[in-house]
Image (cartoon, grey):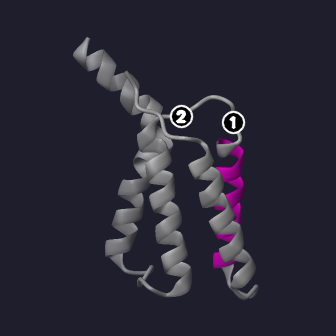
Amino acid sequence: MRVRLLNQLQVVAAALCFAEAAKLPKNDPGPVLTGVMGFLLLLRGIKATPEAAPMILSRCILVGIMVAGDEGFIGSNSWFWTVIVIVVAIPAIFWPKIEKLWKQRLG
């Protein structure tokens, strides 16, 4: 049995991205990237089919890291945060492939 989260969680994360992009100064590339992430989350959130929980959670964590970086709470240019973003982005992007390989290995 797969645990599913509500797709509305991604819509809330998209709204947070849009609010952050509207608040920040426009001469910085951060708001544009935040807006693009919000648009992608909105497209995923309004889909009728539910998605796997690790995909949704990792996307929400990415939004949190992105907003914290835009606000200056973290040094987003350090190697530590770059590694964290890559590790969190792997389930967000490749979860169906990971799950398929896992099922093939077990069965």
What percent of the width, then of the height, locates residue 31?
68, 76
Residue at x 72%, y 88% (from the top left corner):
25
What percent of the width, then of the height, locates residue 32?
71, 72
Which of these two is toward me, 40 or 42?
Answer: 42
Crowd band around label 2 with a 10 angstrom C-alpha radius: few (<14), some (14–19), many (20+): some
Residue at x 47%, y 43% (from the top left corner):
55
Residue at x 54%, y 85% (from the top left corner):
71
Mark 1 and mark 2: span between their CA atoms?
9 Å
On-image quarter of the C terminus: top left
Q: Is residue 43 magenta?
A: yes
- Is residue 107 shown above or below 9? above
Which of these two is toward me, 74 or 29?
Answer: 74
What percent of the width, then of the height, locates residue 66?
52, 71
The three-letter code of the residue at mark 1 reads Lys
User: Which image quadrant for residue 101?
Assistant: top left
Residue at which label 2 appears: 51
Secondary structure under tag 2 reads loop
Q: Residue 47, which numbered label?
A: 1
Q: Name the residue at the left extreme.
A: 106
Magenta residues, dominant SS class? helix
Query: Which residue range is magenta in the image?
Result: 30-44
The three-letter code of the residue at mark 2 reads Glu
- Is residue 74 shown above or below 58? below
- Is residue 76 shown above or below 94? below
Crowd band around label 1 with a 10 angstrom C-alpha radius: few (<14), some (14–19), many (20+): few
Secondary structure under tag 1 reads loop
Q: Is residue 1 magenta?
A: no
Q: Are marks 1 and 2 in contact (CB under 8 Å)?
A: yes
What percent of the width, then of the height, locates residue 24?
69, 85
